[in-house]
């Protein structure tokens, strides 16, 4: 009587995560559009706003706007589009028939985006301090990094909500771009006050305005009502969008 062959065991989770991280980092590094929007554009914005008079905003506010742009672009455009494309092409279906846990598949992608946010923050603050001629203390660097991770989490949850509610990659891309434009315009116009005090107050409660207020405090500004609004709304946006994104997300495109 011969013994039945033993079923192969599940590989260690550490090995699985390492393989997923290598694959996701490779995809990110080979996507020029993501690198440009997430890294190059914030740096260009910081350098461009360093020329001429800057009476309309403090350097910390301008750098915070650029970092907000980077984190929002990564979450609402980069992350959501890549997830939608992988779902449509069957990548998720192939991964789910392997011994890889579902949470590990998404965790790898989120870690890659958070690492990208850290790189973008370090580059943005270093370039901003040089371009704007300001010097920041080490604890301000840590505070800015913490705000960037919080903002990255909020916009990743927003991107997850978009890809959870919409199935088609084209729809995800279109809706993400429209929301991105509306949010970035409201944040910029609100910060410089060109539409009046009422719009400035309104923008403080938007995702970009809330995050920019937190950046301002991290860079050394005094705590204000806008900071309180930011401290409230950033976690609220993150939790609500995470719930929607998890609740309605489907692994298949149909």
Image (cartoon, grey):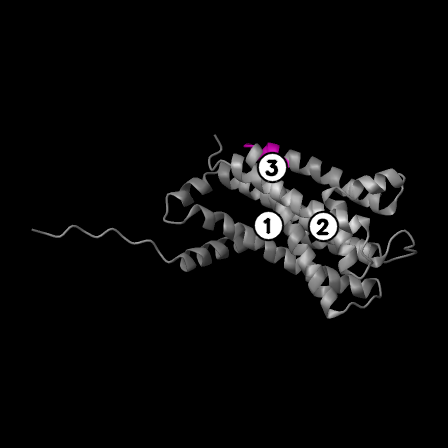
Q: Can residue 77 be seen in this view?
A: no
Which contiguous range is marked in magenta? Answer: 166-173
Q: Residue at x 62, y 50 (%)?
A: 153
x and y percent of residue 36 in the render? 68, 51
Viewed as shown, does residue 238 lie left or right of 231? left
Query: In front: 222, or 182?
Result: 222
User: Helix, strand or loop at disc 1?
Assistant: loop
Residue 214 against residue 94 in the figure, above or below: below
Residue under the image location 80 percent in, 39 percent down: 202
Q: Nearer the viewer, residue 254 or 59?
A: 59
Counting residues from the N terminus, which is met first, the one under dot 1 or under dot 3? 1
In the rendered image, the residue lying farthest to the top is: 254
Element assignment for label 3: helix
- Identify the disc placed on residue 231: 2
Counting residues from the N terminus, which is met first, the one under dot 2 or under dot 3?
Answer: 3
Name the disc covering residue 31, or none.
1
């Amino acid at each position: 009587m011969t013994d039945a062959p033993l079923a192969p065991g599940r590989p260690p989770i550490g090995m699985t995560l390492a393989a997923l991280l290598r694959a996701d980092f490779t995809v990110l590094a080979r996507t020029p559009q993501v690198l440009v929007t997430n890294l190059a554009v914030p740096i260009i914005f910081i350098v461009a706003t360093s020329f001429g008079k800057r009476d309309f905003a403090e350097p910390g506010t301008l750098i915070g706007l650029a970092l907000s742009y980077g984190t929002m672009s990564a979450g609402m455009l980069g992350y959501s589009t890549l997830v939608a494309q992988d779902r449509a092409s069957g990548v998720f279906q192939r991964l789910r028939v392997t011994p890889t846990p579902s949470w590990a598949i998404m965790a790898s992608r989120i870690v890659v985006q958070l690492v990208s946010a850290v790189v973008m923050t370090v580059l943005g603050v270093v370039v901003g301090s040089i371009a704007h001629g300001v010097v920041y203390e080490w604890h301000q660097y840590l505070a800015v990094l913490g705000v960037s991770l919080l903002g990255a989490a909020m916009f990743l949850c927003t991107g997850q909500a978009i890809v959870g509610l919409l199935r088609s990659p084209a729809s995800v891309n279109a809706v993400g771009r429209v929301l991105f434009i509306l949010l970035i315009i409201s944040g910029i116009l609100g910060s410089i006050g060109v539409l009046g005090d009422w719009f400035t107050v309104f923008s403080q409660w938007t995702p970009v305005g809330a995050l920019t207020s937190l950046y301002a405090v991290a860079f050394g500004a005094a705590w204000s009502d806008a900071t309180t609004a930011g401290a409230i709304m950033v976690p609220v946006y993150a939790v609500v969008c995470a719930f929607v994104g998890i609740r309605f997300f489907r692994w298949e495109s149909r």
